Amino acid sequence: MKHTFPKIDLHCHLDGAISPETMFELAQERHLELPADSPETLRPFIVCDPQCRSVNEYLTKFELPTKVLQDREALARVAYELVLRSEKQGLGYLELRFAPQLHTRKGMSQREAVEAVEDGVRIALKQCRSLRAGILLCAMCIGQASDNRQANLETVRLADSCRSDLVRGFDLAGAEGLCALSDFGELFAIARQAGVPFTCHAGDSQGPETVRTAILDFGASRIGHGHHIFEDKELCGIAAERGVTLEICLTSNVQCETRPSYEAHPAKALLDMGVRVTLNTDNPIIAGVTLDSEYDLALARCGFEETDLLRMNRIAAQAAFMEGPERETLLRRLDEAGE
Ligand SMILES: [Zn+2]
């Protein structure tokens, strides 16, 4: 482990974080058909090739996880394993997210899905020395906003009614650009009214106008990806002034071709402009990354300096959906690591 300060991952999808070994076992136990007969041969169906430059290839990697994660036991197990793996990798805080509505194919309710993930995280945290964790519930964009409006309304209401020491916020994920982001405004209005902290995927495959909608219309203080804000300098100024935090995921952006290369990623330029930038994994197993490997790439290919890493983790600690004392402890640990 190269970067030994308590690292923070604010943007990590549970269904992008299942190891091939676990996927294989879960599928076997459930008598599901797999395209491979061992965890090793299953790996290429789950993990993107490092040279992957296609969002379509990237998205195919989510088919198996969704198939396997249709009962409480499977969801709890992958959540449990993600938390323990994160502790091993030296994280101080992990905010994992998932879309409960993707796990209702075999009769599990959204609420049951949330409880299962909570169970897995809670049991894992008991075995962790220094890691803290939170869960965000994602609504999904799968087409027109009306296509799954009821399911999305249920998700945002669950983000409120299930709020706990673990369930901490709300997000909108899925494909960008199938309809106008503003069509999802009612979800964020509900979150705002209920005081549920939220973030929103925007400005990744779509342009800065979606980030504008998320910040100015929804009132988002955090944006999932959001790097295309760079093309709108006025909006960059607004984001910097308002303290909006971008959850940047370098490798995911390159693999999904929303940026042509690491060298062409504007993350460092944004940070230097005063925009609050954080580095995250997005889908650690699918993308084949850890925070350590992302930091190495950030230093080697994106122009970041060592001191930026601590700075961005302080930003992440400030933007995390956590209570005051927990945040102070995390910031203190980061300060001590920087001395
Ligand atoms: Zn994401």
Image (cartoon, rainbow, N blue to C red):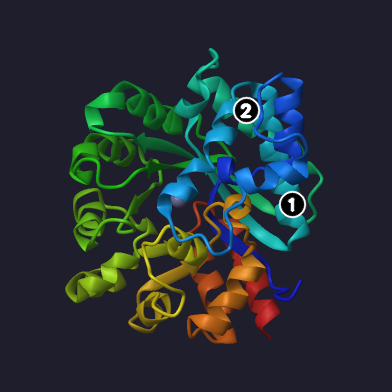
Q: Tell me: residue 167, above or below residue 317.
A: above
Residue at left 23%, top 26%? Answer: 146
Which of the image's four quarters has the C terminus?
Answer: bottom right
The image quadrant of residue 49 is: bottom right
According to the image, label 2 marks what residue? Answer: 68
Residue at left 33%, top 38%? Answer: 191
Observer able to see residue 252 = yes
- Residue 45 locus on image (x, y percent): 61, 43
According to the image, label 1 marks what residue? Answer: 85
The image quadrant of residue 73 is: top right
- Give the left or right position of residue 269, taking residue 58 as reference: left
- Give the left or right position of residue 42, taking residue 244 as reference: right
Q: Tell me: residue 248, above or below residue 323.
A: below
How many marks overall?
2
- Residue 13 locus on image (x, y percent): 54, 46
- Give the left or right position of residue 280, taking residue 285 as reference: left
Amino acid at the residue labelled 2: Val
